[in-house]
Image (tube, coloured by chain):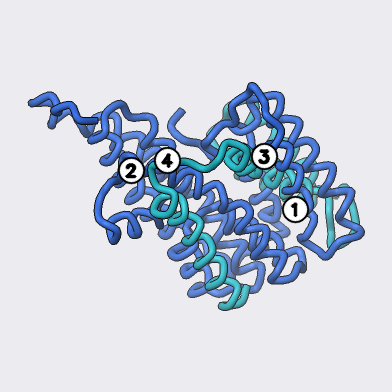
Chain colours: A cyan, B blue
Amino acid sequence: MTWTLIIVVSVGAYALKAAGLVGVGVRDFPAPVRNVIALIPAAVLSALIVKDTFTNGHDLQVDARAIGVAVACVAVWRKVPLWLVIVLACATTGTARAIS
Amino acid sequence: MGRAKPPSKATDDWSGIIGPALGLGFAVFAFGLSFGVMCIDAGGSVPKAMATSLLVFTGASQFSAVSVIAAGGSAVSAVAGALILASRNAVYGVAVAPSLRGSLPYRLFASQFTIDETTGMTLAQDTPERRRRAFWVTAASIYFFWNTATLIGALAGSSIDTQKYGLDVAFAAAFVGMLAPLIRSPRARRVAAAGAVVCLAATPFVPIGAGIIVAALVALVGLKPSKESAPIIATGGPA
């Protein structure tokens, strides 16, 4: 985490927020652009989930993280509050590591 | 819009706003703690964690950037992933713009707070005045809790063994929570599944962290018209 990274992401994130609220304003984006932007979080969040769960650098691996994230999936499906989802996932992975 | 506001509703106008706004604030607290801890774990410092939460102030992008750096990815991958995720805030800006009419400085200031929770709360209200209030009350609540939690997490982070407590899955668990409300439509579910497969398939061959950028390309299927309307809110929201 360098200062350059933080500043670039800050400026970029702010520019995107302002582009919508101030730039485009009460008009709207063209429908295809809007649809693509609306689908990006689904693609990227699921990619982040599998990246954080099954990868180690360039390698794919299954380890104690997988069981914690599996617990998170079940907990979210059962509508458990999000803070508890995080606690359950971490506790499961931590416990799996401790006993293996 | 041009209608006169009904009189004597002023006292009620806060009901149904402050409670849910505080509830969302508590909800982001756990995310903020995780962010603070993992930011330190990824080689950050307390000032860096705080600057990120105060200035970037859009959770998924912050998590994404730290996640890429923690995995050993480049700054370019971290920035690209974070900003691709932040693009939805532009759509949110358009959604809340009719509720936040005002001078240019006012709208420039409001822009910083145009995120998932404020947009969700704003759009859930039924009058322009309630929408404006919901935006600002939620903004204040989330900004306070998110930054306070980041500070506590970052201060605690240096003395926590993140591997021992399984904290390295905190982000993945948070991402699962953020993803769930987004994949109610079959098309979004297919996009999410494809994003995961593409990311894993790309991982051995692309720079560390670039897999999520390759996965983002899956969203281009949105160019094809669909009867399903994509959901506008990514995380939580009051719904």
N-term mark: 1 or 4: 4
For disc 2, the neighbor class at 10 Å (few under 14, some 14 to 19, many from 20) is: many
Residue B4 sits in quarter: top left
Specify the subunit that label 3 lies on. A
Q: Which circle marks residue B212 in the picture?
A: 1
**Pointers 2 and 3 in contact (CB under 8 A)?**
no
Residue ranking furthest to the bottom? A3
For disc 4, the neighbor class at 10 Å (few under 14, some 14 to 19, many from 20) is: many
Residue B215 vertical placement versus B46 (above, below)? above
Specify the subunit that label 1 lies on. B
For this rendering, which residue is in front, A2 or B83? B83
Type of the residue with mark 3: Ala
N-term mark: 4 or 2: 4
Write down the residue under mark 3.
Answer: A42
Q: Is residue B177 visible?
A: no
**Residue A87 drawn at (x, y percent):** 60, 44
Q: Which circle marks residue B135 in the picture?
A: 2
**Pointers 4 and 2 in contact (CB under 8 A)?**
no
For this rendering, which residue is in front, B213 or B148? B213
For disc 1, the neighbor class at 10 Å (few under 14, some 14 to 19, many from 20) is: many
Q: Are both tags, 1 and 4, on one chain?
A: yes
Write down the residue under mark 4.
Answer: B119
Q: Residue at x 58, y 62 (%)?
A: B37
Type of the residue with mark 4: Thr
Indicate left or right for A81 with B19 as reference: right
